Amino acid sequence: MDKTNSLIKMLIAFFIYFLYSMYSLTLGKALGINNELVIMFVSDLIFLVLIVFVYKDNLKKDAMMIKKDYKISKIIKTVVIWVIALFVLNIVMGAITDIVAPGLAIDNNTEALWGMSKIYTIFKTLIFGVVAEEILFRESLRDVVTNNILFVITSAIIYTAMHFIFSGLPENNTIIYMLIYFIPAIVSSLAYIKNKSNIIILMLIKVTYNLIPLTILFLGL
C-alpha cells in the first residue's frame, strides 16, 4: 500500500479516536442520552466497526498467514510464552514500584469499569481493547513505520501519551506512572514484530492476558 495513503488512514483513525474519546459524552448528552455507559458503549462499538472495516484487508492477510504458517500447537506455544512474559513483567514492575515509590496508587481502569458494568468491562477488555486498540496502536502505525526499532519505540510512546491525554498526568511520580504503561507497550510491540507483524497473533496474546484480571475480578480475589 502506498505510504501516503497509509499515513492518511492512520492519521484519520487517530483523529476519530481522539475526537470521540474526548467528546462522545458531551455529544450524547446534547442528543438527550443521559446514560454514560450507553454513550460509551455505542461510541466504542461504532469505532470498533469502523476501524475493522478500514483495516479489513490487513486482517484477511494476517488470517491467511496464520492458516499457512501456524499450526495450532505453535499458536498456543506463542501465546503462552508472551502471556507469561507480560505477566512476569507486570509482577516485576509492581515490585519495582513498591520499592521506588511505596504506597503509590495506580489507577485500575478494569476494576473501576467492573464496578460500573460487568458487561461493558468484558466488552472493553476482551473485544475493544484487544481488537480496536491493537489495530490503532500497532497495525495502523506499522503500515507507516517499517523500521522495527523505530516502530517499537514510536508505538509505545504514542500508546503511553494517549493514555495520559485522556487521564492527565499525576502530580507526583510522573516517570514511574509513564513507565508502567510504556514498558508493557514495548513488550507488546516486540511480540507483534517477532510474529511477523501479525496483528491477529498479538490479539490472541492480549485477549488471553486480559483474561487474568477479569478472572480475578469475577472470582472476587
Image (tube, helix red, strand yellow):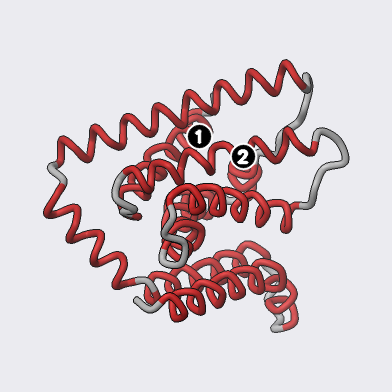
Q: From this viewpoint, which residue is outermost toward the top?
A: 99
x, y (%) of residue 90?
54, 28
Is the residue 138 above or below the residue 36 in the image?
above
x, y (%) of residue 171?
88, 41
Judging depth in this view, the residue of 4 and 109 nearest the camera is: 4
Sequence order check: which comes first, mark 2 or mark 1? 2
Which residue is painted at 27% across and 36% down in the image? 78
Q: Tell me the crowding category of disc 2: few under 14, some 14 to 19, or many 20 or more residues within 10 angstroms, Cα based.
A: some
Which residue is painted at 42% across and 42% down in the image? 190
Q: From this viewpoint, which residue is outermost toward the right?
A: 171
> Please, what is the three-letter code of the amino acid marked with disc 1?
Pro
The answer to whether 163 appears left or right of 146 in the picture is: right
Where disc 1 sits, the SS reads: helix
Question: Quarter-wise, where is residue 15 in the image?
Answer: bottom right
Residue at image mark 1: 213
Q: Tell me the crowding category of disc 1: few under 14, some 14 to 19, or many 20 or more residues within 10 angstroms, Cα based.
A: some
User: Looking at the image, do the residues carrying marks 2 and 1 touch, with CB atoms under 8 Å apart?
Assistant: yes
> Please, what is the three-letter code of the amino acid marked with disc 2?
Glu
